[in-house]
Amino acid sequence: MPTPPLAGGTAGPAALRPLLDTVLAALHDGAALRGGPLPAGGPDTVTPRTRTATHPLIPDHGTGPHHALRALVTALAAGAADPAHPHCAAHLHTPPLALAAAADLAASALNPSMDSWDQAPAASALEADLTSALATEIYPRAPSPDAVITTGGTEANQLALLLARERHGPVQTVCGANAHHSIARAAWLLGLPEPVVVPAPTGTLDLAALDDALTELHRPLLVVATAGTTDTGEIDPLDAIADLCTTHDAELHIDAAYGGPLLLSPTHRPLLHGLDRAHSVTLDLHKLGWQPASAGLLAVPEHHHLTPLHHHAPYLNADDDTEAGLPDLLGRSLRTTRRPDALKIAVTLQALGRSGLADLVDRTVATAHHLADLITRTPALDLYDRPTISTVLFRPTGADDHTVATVRRTLLQRGHAVLGRAHAGGRLWLKATLLNPHTTPQDLQTLLALVTGTTTDLLTGPPADPHTGSQADLLTDPPAPEAREPAPQAPATPHASSAPAAREAPEAAMPAPEATPPAPEAAPQTPPALKAPEAAPTPAPATTRPTPHPTEGDTPR
């Protein structure tokens, strides 16, 4: 076998072009084989099918580049949970923009390593300009704001606690019960006291409880607020929290991994009022920024706040090299080797501009409001609340938590939809995290039809699904721990009517729904090479709906 060609240099593009044709064809074929948002059958089906298609992974003699790319990429795409499908909406798992993915290819081909200037001359300059520009978006009035690129919100939150510790010693972190799990984990990793958790009974941090905690605790203190929770997408009262931090001489970190890109929308930017009062801010553009993972940032209002990250390794940032003018990159991350993730972000920002990104944000938020509207018009479903960003919680009317969990797993097993789960108001809810700006009203209607039809299947007991066993098995399988709670005596009722009027999306944002949502289209047949077990027919919406709740707006969150 001849020596394989390289991706870089003047010969690299010619070597890549035919390989890319193979990759693109395999991505298409794999998506066609899958025929939906994820493969049917669950782990017991997907794992052996993937292994059959990809093994042996280390053969004695290679199969050649095109065969290997075709086999493995097709298998991966056929077995993917594809966030580009409108019914793949469980997590903060964004469908990346094509232009960002193309830029990521260039980054992979050039392969700059962002730990020394002589490995990344232009990439280091681009990253410095990009981080400064994004930090200025967050801190428009600060004299020298800056940011560092991270692998995501978890690393950014860890850096925020690290910087606070380096400034003040063993800080006591104070966060809401709605805070991301990475806050407690970061405190553990850094040897800091376990965070003091303040109640968030309505989904956002309780101000009176925070005031009490800050009054009683010893300094130094670091309060962590959240702008976009993973469960409901809600935003803490940032300005009021900043006021309490000022009163009690506490620092403030804001985890805006999800909600931070609202800054780019003139319509939704007011939701983040007070963001610039934080001592540090987490931003994650592989969520509401449509970037391939990873694309996180930690922003600070003053460049010198990042000084504690400085590290010296003579082979990478020798003193005489630095004195001679070579930029020192080791203080830009806790990692050594790291990718030039700034490139795809910069390409996206330049290609779309402020107006283009604002349009994506506004479309996505409007889609979430439209889904909430459809749910409120569907007697068989309950809405938890109007969405703050793009997360919508809902559940079948009258169902207990076990049934809600089983509906979700059944949709996964059948390959029909990927919905998340969240506890709120003492109950388990289905969670739709909408991040696809191409999602249509018809897609949303079909998604709800899948949920109501699956619920009817489970409660009335139609013929067994070939992937999931009998309906009795589905409803008697042990539920996940959080789904074991007994149903309350009186079903929880939605309280969307109590949401502030400012959070309502205009009715004209998307077309009105049809009277009866159509049944989803059947998935295409899977060719024999990667054929999945036949999926159960997609249920049509129930014609007789359960009795709706008699009241709204009286259930605490």
Image (cartoon, helix red, strand yellow):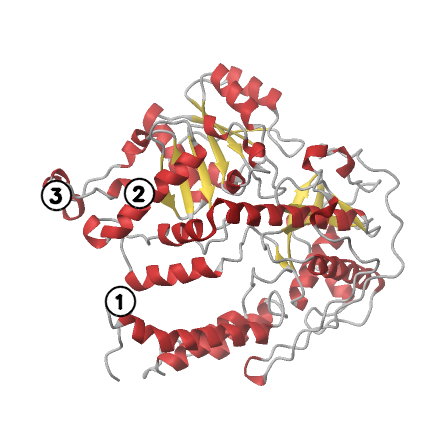
- 143 shown above or below 427: above
Q: Does residue 496 appear left or right of residue 99 in this picture?
A: right
Q: CA distance from mark 3 to mark 2?
A: 19 Å
Closer to the N terminus: mark 3 or mark 2?
2
Q: Secondary structure at mark 2?
A: helix
User: Where's residue 225, x and y in %?
Assistant: 52, 31
**Disc sitting over residue 128 in the figure:** 2
Q: Position of residue 276 (x, y in %)?
A: 46, 29
Q: Is 528 displayed left or right of 539 in the figure?
A: left
- Residue at 39 percent across and 59 percent down: it is 103
The residue at which mark 3 appears reads as 321
Q: Amino acid at mark 2?
A: Ala
Of tags 1 and 3, which is closer to the observer? 1
Whether residues under marks 3 and 2 lie with C-beta atoms below 8 angstroms apart, the answer is: no
Image height check: is 519 above or below 496? below
Above or below, 357 relative to 466:
above
Q: Position of residue 466 (x, y in %)?
A: 71, 74
Q: Which mark is residue 8?
A: 1
Disc 1 marks which amino acid?
Gly
Label total for image: 3
